[in-house]
Image (tube, rainbow, N blue to C red):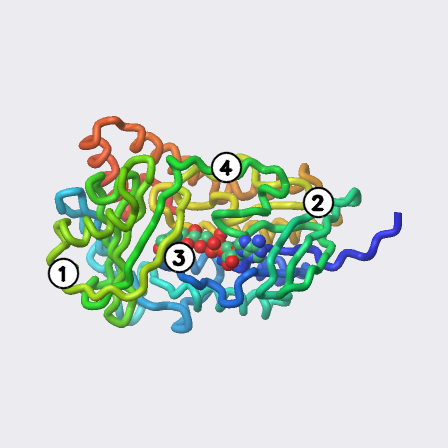
Amino acid sequence: MFMNPVDYDVVIIGCGPAGTTTARVAAQKGLKVLLVDKRQELGAPIQCSGALSASALEDADIDPNAEFVQDEIFGFRVYNEVGDQSNIDYRILKPEKYGIGVDKKPLGYVVDRRRFDRYLMTLAERAGAEVWLKTEGVSYKPLDDYTCEVYLRKFNKEIIVRTKVLVGADGLQSQVGKWAGLDTHIKMTELASCLQFVVDGVETNGMLEIITGHEWAPGGYAWLFPKGHGYAEVGLGVIRTMTKQNAQWHLDHFINNSFLKERLKHARILPVQGGGVPLAAPLRTQYAANLILVGDAARHVNPITGGGLHTALIGGMIAGGFLAELIQSGSNTSAENLKGYQNHWEEGLGNKMWQLYHVKKSIFKMEDIDQRNLKLYETMSDYFNPHSVYKKV
Ligand SMILES: Cc1cc2nc3c(=O)[nH]c(=O)nc-3n(C[C@H](O)[C@H](O)[C@H](O)COP(=O)(O)OP(=O)(O)OC[C@H]3O[C@@H](n4cnc5c(N)ncnc54)[C@H](O)[C@@H]3O)c2cc1C
């Protein structure tokens, strides 16, 4: 049968941190890459607090840049339900390394997701990837020569491209995995419903504040993060099956009644942002013939913290590197060969995530709320500690 030549080695759907990183690495290593996103303005509307560690950027070979950094982070303050706190300030715990000044650095950053995603897209473009915005992935069809057709809608025009691999980096509500028949179902008991207000007039002193306790955030936690220029983010995530109220009710309740109410009393509310976060296990199968998933689409999200930026970046590094090696070796992109991607990912990241998932599960299956509160507070305090028993992801 006559076939047109393939258009691309890799087509990636989704220009978030996972997709742009996969694209950058694959293009850097010499693959012909197309990256598409249905949005015109990347990262908007913002559905993320933007907190990530300095090591996340290091792991992804990205220098912190004023273009996207909104604030610097130096530690954590973890509270239990009544306001007792673990103060994990790396400026005090490791003063030789963390702080402001020569030879010192921040522990992490809060980034502006619109600017960050655009910055990552530019890096991918500069590495040689072609980028089409306002282009929606609609479906795909595997062909019998280990390539596939991807159906796209660019502005209002239908376009078909042929590629060796399709990467689904299309976020929490991934359709790409469904097209391939992968089990992407997420239980309501593992989906956090998140809401945050950007507020003015709340001092944060470079600390990520995490408030545990069923009273404030059933199934999740509340947070108060710096946002730069004197702004802060106050938000929370709740598991809807654990409460009769929605996230908005809980956030109002937290702001008006918690032990932080005095600090939050003069907060002027600016934008309201929200979205879902999977506090779930990684997908058991993240590949099919001609197809892999990365980032939120594969549930590469830390099930304890709900953070998905670091894992999206590392997942993208692993995916881009693996695909380059596979395709350049002349091997085909059968499901069997693409299983190697998941194996690499399990070794690099997945095993740690599975460990965290089991910890999270053991906490939330406790029937006794006081015991559960205590265990969550202890686990969160331990997780952010420099001497933590948990491996950070
Ligand atoms: C309220 C909230 C706060 C959060 N705070 C933090 C935090 O502080 N730190 C942290 O680490 N994580 C945080 N997260 C999680 C983090 O935002 C995600 O884990 C991260 O964005 C995942 O990146 P991704 O690239 O996998 O997917 P996304 O960033 O979701 O990107 C997916 C992209 O795919 C595009 N897309 C989807 N479908 C299609 C299609 N059919 N065709 C074309 N394009 C498509 C979308 O437009 C989008 O640009 C937060 C999440 C929420 C909801």
Label 1 sits on residue:
265
Q: Are marks 1 and 3 in contact (CB under 8 Å)?
A: no
- Name the amino acid type tagged 4: His
Q: Residue 333, labelled with which disc?
A: 2
Rounded to the nearest angstrom, the CA distance separating label 2 from label 1 is 57 Å
- Mark 1 crowd level (few <14, some 14–19, many ≥20, 10 Å Cα): few
Give whichever of 198, 325 is nearer the camera.
Answer: 198
- Name the amino acid type tagged 2: Thr
Instruction: Measuring from the top left, give residue 54's x and y in whole percent.
Output: 37, 59
Rounded to the nearest angstrom, the CA distance separating label 1 from label 4 is 40 Å
Does dot 1 land on a helix, a strand or a loop? Answer: loop
Among the 4 quarters of the image, the one containing residue 134: bottom right
Instruction: Measuring from the top left, give residue 331's x and y in whole percent.
Output: 74, 45
Rounded to the nearest angstrom, the CA distance separating label 4 from label 3 is 21 Å
Does dot 3 land on a helix, a strand or a loop? Answer: loop
Among the 4 quarters of the image, the one containing residue 154: bottom right
Q: Residue at x 21, y 27 (%)?
A: 368
Give whichever of 299, 150 is nearer the camera.
Answer: 150
Q: Residue at x 18, y 32 (%)?
A: 370
